[in-house]
Amino acid sequence: MATAITAGYTVAMKYLSTTQIDHFQQDGYLVIDDFLSPDTVKAVEAGIAQRCAEFATMSTDQGSFNLEKVGDDHFNRQAAAKRPGMLRKIQSAVFEVSQIRDVFTSQTMLDCMEDLMGPDIFYHSSKVMFKPAGGGAPKPWHQDAAYWTQYVSRQITVWIAIHDANAENGCVWAIPGSHKLGLIPHSEIELQVKDSQIDVSKAIPVPVKPGGMLIFHSLVLHMSHKNTSNQDRWAIICDYDCNPNPIIEDWKGHHISGIDEHGVWPLRQGATSAI
């Protein structure tokens, strides 16, 4: 069993190795291959597909379901869709697809998060991100923490590939060590960092196979290019916080145990799981 020194005492790691933790602390991100089994990937994919089928004729954004837009004008809910039912994002994914909730609240996932952020783990937000073949739009350089400036930037994001994510279909690109730069000013409606503000020459692609997981600090600079291939790219994403901040999504009306009246959802506190 791996161990690490924290605040002067030895802590036993529950999932990660000390080498993996060192890599995360140095680069701000870490890839874990085969985090999900092939059967689990298929189950998640089926759950997403079943939910998407309910919105196959949708031509404008509805609730948590956001479409790919003409001109990539994604922050305009009234912008024209590239085609009906061509989704870009499902927000609040753990509330929309039970298979995704099972993945992000599993004991294995929480063990992994505990190794990185300590024994107090709170749900923050989640989503499904689509890059449809031949039409999935790019995402400019940004830090996730720029969307949550009301909170201390200590969140950790997990990004799990449902389909193969590669350079052709829009895998994530990241700048190693950029989490040490602090929060960089973001601009424009989509909240992005301009190339002139950062050293893009340090950026590297981070391909991930189906079932693989990319973990990154909320201050890591990352982006993705347009999907120019004939292959869809789906990923499920969850953000965790070590502080008891309220969920940033509309959680009311969903019958999920463990969420208090203030919208705080503890997934694990100390050695006791709240799931």
Image (cartoon, helix red, strand yellow):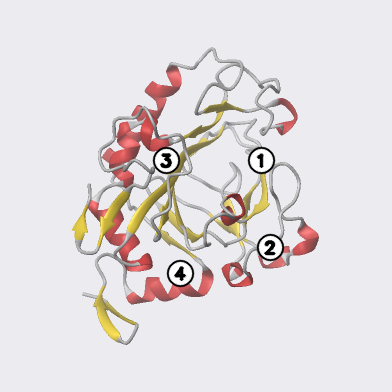
Question: Which disc, if any, is residue 24?
Answer: 4
Q: Quadrant of residue 84?
A: top right
Location of residue 160 in the rendering, given as x and y in whole percent from the top left corner: 42, 47
Measured in 3D between alpha carbons, the distance from the residue under mark 4 to the one under mark 3, in whole angstroms, is 22 Å
Measured in 3D between alpha carbons, the distance from the residue under mark 2 to the one under mark 4, in whole angstroms, is 20 Å
Dot in front, 2 or 4: 2
**Residue in the foreground of this view, choosing between 136 and 141:** 141
Question: Which disc, if any, is residue 226?
Answer: 1
Q: Check the image and report above or below for 115 versus 132.
A: below
Which residue of the protein is positioned furthest toward the top in this rendering?
Answer: 57
Q: Residue at x 33, y 53 (%)?
A: 35
Q: Quadrant of residue 161?
A: top left
Crowd around label 1: few <14 · some 14–19 · many ≥20 (10 Å): some
Q: Amino acid at mark 2?
A: Ile
Dot in front, 4 or 3: 4
Left or right of 140: which side holds 170?
left
Q: Amino acid at mark 1?
A: Lys
